[in-house]
Amino acid sequence: MNHLKTSIRTKENRKRWNFAIKLILLILLEFIYEGETYLRPLLDNYSLLNHVIRALIFLLSANLIISLGRIITLRLYLQKTAETKVLPNFVVGIGRISGILNSLALLISLMLAFGIRPLEFLTSITIVAAAIALLTKDYITSIVNGLIIMFSEQLEIGDKITIGKNTGFIRDFTLMNTVLKSETGEIIIIPNSMMLTSDVINYSKNNTHQVVFDAEMPYSTDLQLINLEEKLVEVLKQFSDYVILEGAQLNVLERKSDNVLVRYQFPIKSGEKLVESQVRKTINQAFLNWSNEHRKA
């Protein structure tokens, strides 16, 4: 079974317990608000308490409806989607939409808690609302762009991409930005508007992509390119299920006064990020071992 699919189902099962607890709390609040209990005199005498309980009932009701919609949507998605085609960013997108709707519900609940009628309030500030809409137009556009990216199959969390001069692995999608992590560990923030208007190279959508190593080899070492290449191929054989050994090649990029710059590259299956990380460490160690051995010689 797909690990991602299992992980999503496990998290959703935990959230169902939260759903049940909130449902029980809603029933209890509804009973207090509508029933003839010992708290009825307090509700009649203290309007603020009455408004607060009403606001909590609205907030819990809205949250339960949103949660139910999210649970049903994810359940249908997991049932209809093949094991290998489950996209983590779809789950992220559903979570972001739920967050937006819950924020709106919280805002309305605060109005109800202070005795403000939301519809009357909104109609009374029409001009102000229009001004706010103009000021937040760019933010709204970026949020829409973010949702488009999340529900698109073109980009996925974990994909290796290049946009502009930035290359890295997608770590997260937010409503405003796409978060990348470069191979050297830097976090790169790309605005979602830029993601949709710029050329993006997605290496992970190919079956394979090139892994490249550049190294400077001093002339003082007994540098034999054929021997070095054979040594590196020998190291790669332990990853033969993922690396295409026939495509490996060692080339000289530049000759300097005291050293030579060489490049070793080979194709590797895309989507195997943990394996690729191990391969990189192994090849880097092989270069260090080669240099140390020949320096001693």
Image: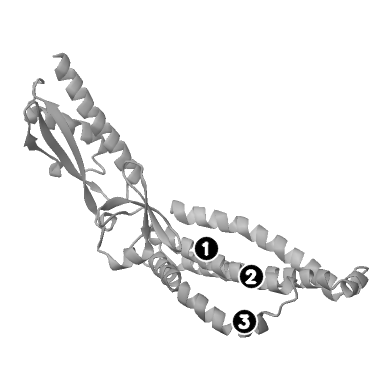
Along the line of sight, which residue is nearer the eye, 87 or 152?
Answer: 152
Earlier along the polypeptide chain: callout 3 or callout 2? 2
Q: Quadrant of residue 110?
A: bottom right
Q: Which residue is mark 2?
A: 107
Of tags 3 and 2, the one toward the viewer is: 3
Task: Measure the alpha-carbon separation of dots 1 and 3.
Answer: 27 Å
Is 251 left, or right, of 270 in this rendering? left
Task: Measure the alpha-carbon separation of dots 2 and 1.
Answer: 18 Å
Q: Amino acid at mark 3?
A: Leu
Q: Residue furthest top?
A: 297
Q: Amino acid at mark 1?
A: Gly
Q: Amino acid at mark 2?
A: Leu
Image position of 15 with respect to 103: above or below: above
Looking at the image, can residue 109 be seen? yes
Looking at the image, can residue 1 be seen? no
Q: Identify the element where label 1 is drawn.
A: helix
Q: Residues within 10 Å of mark 3 (few under 14, many from 20)?
A: few
Look at the numbered discs 2 and 1 and tell me whether their residues touch, using CB distance below 8 Å. no
Residue 19 appears at what percent x and percent y? 66, 63
Q: Residues within 10 Å of mark 2 (few under 14, many from 20)?
A: some
Q: Residues within 10 Å of mark 1 (few under 14, many from 20)?
A: some
Q: Quadrant of residue 29?
A: bottom right
- The residue shown at (14%, 41%) is 248
- The residue shown at (64%, 70%) is 107
Image position of 178 with respect to 68: above or below: above
Earlier along the polypeptide chain: callout 2 or callout 1? 1
Is 139 left, or right, of 164 in this rendering? right
Q: Which residue is mark 1?
A: 95
Look at the numbered discs 1 and 3 and tell me whether their residues touch, using CB distance below 8 Å. no
Residue 56 appears at what percent x and percent y? 73, 68
Q: Which residue is mark 3?
A: 122
Residue 12 appears at what percent x and percent y? 57, 58
